[in-house]
Amino acid sequence: MRIPVLAAALLLAAGTAALAATPAPSGTPPQRIDALKLQPKSLAPKVALHVEYTVEINKLGQVARVRTVKPSHNEAFDAKTYGNALQAFIRTPDGQVVLGTYRLTYEYDPKTMRVRRDVALVKAGGVDPEAKGAATEMMEIAHRNRNRTMPPAANQTPGPAPSVTIRRLPDLNQVMKPSPSPSPHT
């Protein structure tokens, strides 16, 4: 009878010692990672940038195609915003879709290093409601072409194929067997 009581007392003592060794949780929340600290300011554009895309949407609110582009003449910014525009969904605040043509504008502010996107309806109707979304169509093309090799660059002529010597390696079982001891030549 004494042994179970003694064991219980030891477990209780060990548990309270473990609780005392555990630090109390602090009241401060974990630190937030700030994107501005991760992006070196020297890489960010130093001037304000503005891009406009005129896009059509389908019945789901997905951008189906880009009709026109007014570029900012900063190729990196234009490429990023174009990719964003192709993936955009445009809906009303209550989730409804108004079929039509929209203007997507992207404004970069060098002081805050932030991009603001605005959406404005240009014309209601006049689009194919059954059109595939641009992002969906690109994914289907990528899946169809996933096993194909990329074509060579247009401005490069293919050079001669490198000469490759194929040497057959010895069998693993042969390598792992101990070699016979050398015999003297007589």
Image (cartoon, grey):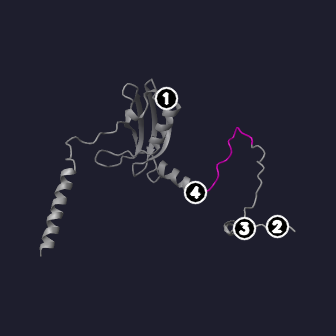
Estimate how packed mark 2 is, as few (under 14), some (14 to 19) or many (20 or more) residues with alpha carbons within 10 Å.
few
Query: Quarter of the image holding residue 170?
Result: bottom right
Q: Which mark is residue 179?
A: 3
Examine the structure image and report whether residue 147 is included in the region drawn in magenta.
Answer: yes
Label 4 – label 2 distance at C-alpha: 65 Å
Camera-near label (4 vs 3) is 3
Q: Read off the residue under disc 4.
A: 144
User: Do tag 2 and tag 1 residues touch (Cβ < 8 Å)?
Assistant: no
Q: Amino acid at mark 4?
A: Arg
Residues shaded magenta: 146-157
State left or right for residue 112 relative to residue 149: left
Q: Examine the rendered structure and indicate whether residue 47 appears above or below residue 101.
A: above
Q: Which type of secondary structure does the marked residue at label 1 adopt? A: loop
Q: Residue at x 21, y 50 (%)?
A: 21
Q: Position of residue 86 (x, y in %)?
A: 47, 44
Measure the C-alpha gap from mark 2 to mark 3: 15 Å
Q: Quadrant of the C terminus?
A: bottom right
> Which amino acid, by three-letter code, is at mark 3?
Ser
Asked which secondary structure carries label 2, the reply is loop
Q: What numbered label is drawn on residue 63?
A: none
